[in-house]
Every structure is written in C-alpha cells, then in structure tokens.
Amino acid sequence: MNISHAHFLVAVLGVALCATPAATAQKPPADRPHEGTLDSSIDTESNNPSVEMRALEQEQYNIEEYLYLVLFNQQYGDHIAAERIVIPTVDAGTEPAYVFSPKSLKPGASYPGLVIAHGSYHGSLDPVMFGLIETAVRNGYIVIFPEYRGSRGYGESTYDAIDFGGKEVDDVVAAADYLSSTRPVPKDRIAIYGRSKGGMIAMLAIERFPTRFAAAVDVVGLVDMVAYMAYKPGFRGDDVAKQPRFGGKTIAQDAGPYIDVSPLNHVEDIRTPVLVENTTGDKTAPVQLHGGRLIELLKAHNKVFEYKIYDLAPGGHTFSEVDSPEARDSQEHIFQFLAKYMHPLH
C-alpha cells in the first residue's frame, strides 16, 4: 500500500462517518488495546522504508475496521445496536470486541448470548460475517465478536500477539464472561460459534472449559494441526513455527505443541452439545482430515452432537460465505440446533 492509498482510505472513512446517522456513531476505543512494552510501538517518524510500510499497513487495517462498522450500521442500524469496545482478558490485558444486540431490549428479559470466533490467520470483523450476526440478533441473541490476539485492525501489538490455539482461546472465554457480566445474558445461556480457525478455537474452548458454553458450532474447523501443517505452504508453516508456543520448531523437531492444540486429541473432554458442518471439496480443511475424523471421534466417545456434510458446496472452505442454497441451509440448521439448547426469545 502506498501513501496516496492510505490518504484515500482516510478520506473515505471521513465521508462514511459523516454519512452515518448520529444514532449509530461510536466512541472510538484506544487504538492499541494491548499496551505492550515501551519499545513495541511503530516509529511513525522513521525514514526506514520497511518501518514506514509496516505503519501504513497497520493504519490501513485500522481504517478498514472502522469502515466495516460504518457499513454494518448503514445496513442494519435500524434494528441492531452495534458497539465497538475494549474488554479485559484473563491475563490482565485487554482485547477489542464488538457487541451486537436488538435495538429495543425488553425490560426485565434475559437473552441468550453467542460468541462468534472469526477465522483466518490474522482475521477480524468482516462483511462476510454480517449475515450471520444479523440472523443471530434477529433470532433473539446478543452477540459478542471478540477480536482475539492476532486479529488485524487494532495495532501492531494485537496483530503480533497471535497465539495459534493458545491464549486466543482464553480471549473468547473472556468475551463470554464479559457478556454475562455486562448484558442481560445468563452465564449458562451462552453458545460459541467458530468458522475455520475460529472453529478450532471454539472446539478448544469447549474442551478446555467443558461447562462454560451451553452449545457450540464448528464450521469447517481446523481440528488437526499436525495434518494441517503437513500440507500448508512453507511460508505459513514457518510463520506458525515462529510463535512462542511452538518455540521456532517444526513438527519434525517437536510435535508436542502441535498435538496439544489439535482439538481431535481432546474430544473426550467435551461436555457441550456441538454441531459440526463441513463440505467435500474443502482444500483448506479437507473433510477426510478434519471434520470427518472429528465426527467419528464424537461418535466413539458418545458425545451429544449433530453434523452435516455438504457435497461440493460452492466456495469450498468458504461455502458459508456464498449466497447459495447450501449456505442458507447451513445457517438455518445452525439456528435450529442452537434453539434446542438456548431457547431464544422471538
């Protein structure tokens, strides 16, 4: 990205904010939710091209997230209240998050909660998730969307704190705790949904915290990190290996940490009803290596679960983001499943 592109994004953001109704204006939180060490911030006065590009990249991500919030408010602000906030984490830090709730809450009523864990290596709130969020709120849920460590759009310290299968899980559990302590959401009526990497996080959350969630949904989740790392491009494998959790070691050098963060290896700990959805033709999380094996282990351990495997759904790994019969059926199935355990108001 060049400087003129950054200026263009800033200009677009200004126009978009001016066009947004006052009722949907948000108080901007701190741009650096994790304070970090004193020498961890980007030197914005540097003349080093690589440092300048890093600063521009992070600023672009930040602007994108504000634009996405504006876009959400323009599309759904008539019936959904969207808040961008910063919440505490379990290790005395903070994380960005969004809360989406019905515009008019019924006095004295309680609502089921839904934690949505996004996917992607450095993912964040994205328009492809808007439909799911809107459907959840329309079905009576209060949604929290945590931007767990590693998410982009909230500064370098959050971006670089990625912890694949580690403290990211603690962050989504902290989001559930925040929701039940600040909104009319009972602690025992919170479900978790995850897609792709978010599916991995959701599964690890119900394995490590067996009584925290009332139901869980895993869509095309990565559930075997050992298998996943075997077919990922070399640069991505190197990126993952560099994380402190893996100590700079590949699977061949030390498989233990990769085995530990693979949900397949902890299915016996699950006490939460779970829905698993996959499709054949998924190249990122092939059903034969991930969802299919998870389903067989859930059966073997007599867990409460449902599953659906679509046949070559358009989009493959991203099938739930496509406007297709399969994606619509998937979403309908998800909320039918959740309703059995969450009992939302209508």
Image: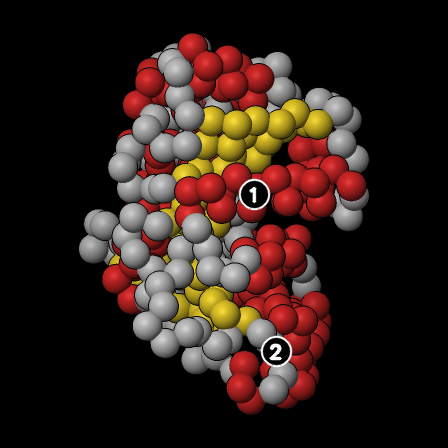
Q: Disc 1 versus disc 2: distance between alpha carbons?
A: 25 Å
Side (left or right) of 4 relative to 55: right
Side (left or right) of 325 relative to 275: right
Task: Please say if 199 is above or below 5.
Answer: above
Q: Residues within 10 Å of mark 2 (few under 14, many from 20)?
A: few
Where disc 2 sits, the SS reads: loop
Name the residue: 74% across, 37% down. 326
Q: How many marks?
A: 2
Task: Please say if 306 is above or below 253.
Answer: below
- The tag on residue 78 is 2
Q: Nearer the viewer, residue 69 or 116?
A: 116
Name the spot of residue 43 as percent of width and height, x first. Answer: 42, 64
Task: Please say if 172 is above or below 16.
Answer: above
- The tag on residue 336 is 1
Q: Residues within 10 Å of mark 1 (few under 14, many from 20)?
A: few
Name the residue: 62% across, 20% down. 287
Name the spot of residue 40 as percent of width and height, x first. Answer: 34, 56
Quadrant of the rendered image containing residue 245: top left
Q: Is residue 223 visible?
A: yes
> Disc 2 residue type?
Asp
Which numbered mark, 1 or 2, is in the foreground of this view? Answer: 1
Name the residue: 52% across, 62% down. 346
Name the spot of residue 133 as percent of width and height, x first. Answer: 56, 57
Name the residue: 79% across, 43% down. 324
Task: Please say if 133 is above or below 239.
Answer: below
> Disc 1 residue type?
Gln
Name the spot of residue 59 as percent of width and height, x first. Answer: 54, 65
Location of the N terminus by quadrant is bottom right
State if disc 2 and disc 1 touch (CB < 8 Å): no
Q: Nearer the viewer, residue 20 or 218?
A: 218
